[in-house]
Amino acid sequence: AHAAVTDVQGRKLLHDQRIAREGFDVAVAATNDTQLKLRDWSLVRGDAGYQARIRAQDFALDLEFAPTQPVLLQGRQGLSRKGPQDKQASYYYSQPQLRTRGLLTLRGQPLQVLGTAWLDHEWSEELLHPEAVGWDWIGMNFADGSALTAFRLRRRDGSTLWDGGSFRTAGGSLYTASRGETEFSPQRFWKSPASQATYPVEWIVRTPADFYTVKAVTDNQELDSRNSTGAIYWEGLSDLYDSNGRKVARGYLEMTGYASPLRM
């Protein structure tokens, strides 16, 4: 498991990680519901929603997340293609616009949290296509209640192997993108002093809903999870601007395979 908090004012990413084998009440992962425990970290689903409790080195989270919308099934009724072959697919659902409240403790100071969150759950028995070295992905909660997902799998030369995504309006109308309808164009880059990897931290993303500009809130949001989930990647807080230049959403940008090809 890997947890992170973006300190916007300090322009710094705080992160921590855990790893353990199941058993002895140290690590537990239920197979029929969201009941996860990893040492002093937990994510549990109850009648009212989810609860996350994280005790990290530089921060702590004690948050509750209540659904405000139905589950969003990505792809074709929850089966999301990830490559040119039918078997290259994952089961994938999202819960955007989660009403969030609780406590964030930052360097010993407790802060009340009110806002919105996004939960993604994706799993598969298939490996990535052999030409894929990583992916670029965004999940964005709009101020009006809409939700946007966009992704692409990327070849070593930077070209797109596969793409997709969805847009659901606040009223519940859902459009699922077909291959070729989503396009990522990098606009600005940042080089990590730690890994020497270069990441696009600003994008123009073309979707069936609109042309959007994605801008990282702060450039240095690289995560080194080699001691837990096994990769160096970039995932962080980002803003979304529509084709008229208006900031319409905030969410996360994730980019993998830039430090080295992703192994799955």
Image (spheres, grey):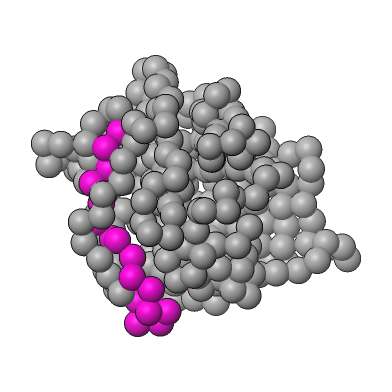
Is 180 left or right of 15, judged from the image as shown?
Answer: left
Name the residue: 48% across, 56% down.
Answer: 134
Question: Residue 261 lies in magenta, yes or no?
Answer: no
Q: Quadrant of the N terminus?
A: bottom right
Question: Residue 195 lies in magenta, yes or no?
Answer: yes
Q: How many marks?
A: 0
Residue 233 drawn at (x, y percent): 47, 65
Asked if residue 74 can be seen in this view, the reply is yes
Q: Name the quadrant containing residue 76.
A: top right
Bounds of the magenta span? 192-207
Q: Quadrant of the C terminus?
A: bottom right
Name the residue: 38% across, 59% down.
Answer: 157
Is 144 left or right of 75, judged from the image as shown?
Answer: left
Q: Name the quadrant containing residue 194.
A: bottom left
Give the vertical position of 234 relative to 159 (above or below): below
Is 190 left or right of 157, judged from the image as shown?
Answer: left
Residue projecting furthest to the bottom: 193
Is 3 left or right of 96, judged from the image as shown?
Answer: right
Q: Name the quadrant containing residue 146.
A: top left
Name the residue: 27% across, 37% down.
Answer: 206
87 or 253: nearer the eye?
Answer: 87
Give the vertical position of 191 relative to 117 (above or below): below
Residue 154 drawn at (x, y percent): 43, 52
Residue projecting furthest to the right: 24
Residue 85 drawn at (x, y percent): 59, 36
Residue 195 drawn at (x, y percent): 42, 79
